Amino acid sequence: ACWNWNTWILFIQYAACFGVELTMNNAAALYFRDEFGQSNEAARSIAAIFGWLNLFARGLGGFASDACMYNYGMKGRIWIQTILLLLEGGMVFVFMHTTTLGGSIAALVVFSLFVQACEGTSYGIVPYVDPVNMGSVCGIVGAGGNVGAVGFGLCFRQMDYKRAFFIMGGCIVGSSVLSLGLVINGYSGIIWGKDRYVDKETGKIYKPVSTAITTDKKNDGAAEFSTRAPPYKDRGSEKFIGAEVGGDAGRV
């Protein structure tokens, strides 16, 4: 997992969403107290809105990722991840330039929605990176969130709010560009890569074979059934016979 560059791209992107969440859980209350003159209790109550959206927004991101995979394949999962990161980064700039309390709370809600949803789309991609070493991939990507929180936290500690938010937003938008490099074995990426039939448990690629029913003369005329890889929305429950790349074994 450590040698797969997709793991580290997701590490950075998870730092740009979960790392942001951890940072905002601490910084938002101070921001509303210092910038809008709210009491500690009021500022903490407003900041808590950011975390409450976890009740549904992260799952919503996972649902959106699944829906995109169903219709567009892995490219769909990567696109929705990229779009949410761009929207998240954009909302940082909107939030930092909002000068009214009501507007800032509204911006915070939308900002949090995109942050949590992006966490869901990140882990919609993780299981496909290296199925055999999925635990290692999950651990590395998850650690990205904590690393991001430390980095952004230092920005808020050492800089004024405007500059800290500017750096945070720039890092999030920059991380979205890295999606161009996400090319998972057996799946099409945004720019390159090719969709092929992949075993979900091992990540191995199987060659698609024809739909014709053939007769094996060497086995007393026994019929051999084979099928091409079906569209994504039709995959999951079907049985298939394919030749494993690099081997002679078939699979049903």
Image: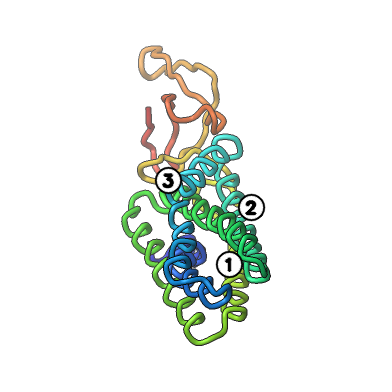
What type is the residue that disc 2 sits on? Ile
Would you say residue 17 is visible in this rendering?
Answer: yes
Q: Earlier in the sequence, mark 1 or mark 2?
A: 1
Mark whose residue sits in front, 3 or 2? 2
Position above or below: 239 against 167? above
Mark whose residue sits in front, 1 or 2? 1
Mark whose residue sits in front, 3 or 1? 1
Would you say residue 19 is visible in this rendering?
Answer: no
The location of residue 203, given as percent across then percent down, is 41, 46
Residue marked by disc 2: 190
Element assignment for label 3? loop
Q: Residue at x 36, y 57 (%)?
A: 138
What type is the residue that disc 1 sits on? Ile
User: Quadrant location of residue 219?
Assistant: top left
Position above or below: 115 against 100? above
Whether pointer 1 and pointer 2 mark residues with C-beta atoms closer than 8 Å, the reply is: no
Q: Which residue is drawn at 62% across and 76% down?
A: 166
Q: Residue furthest top?
A: 221
**Residue 172 tag number:** 1
Residue marked by disc 3: 246
Quadrant showing the C terminus: top left
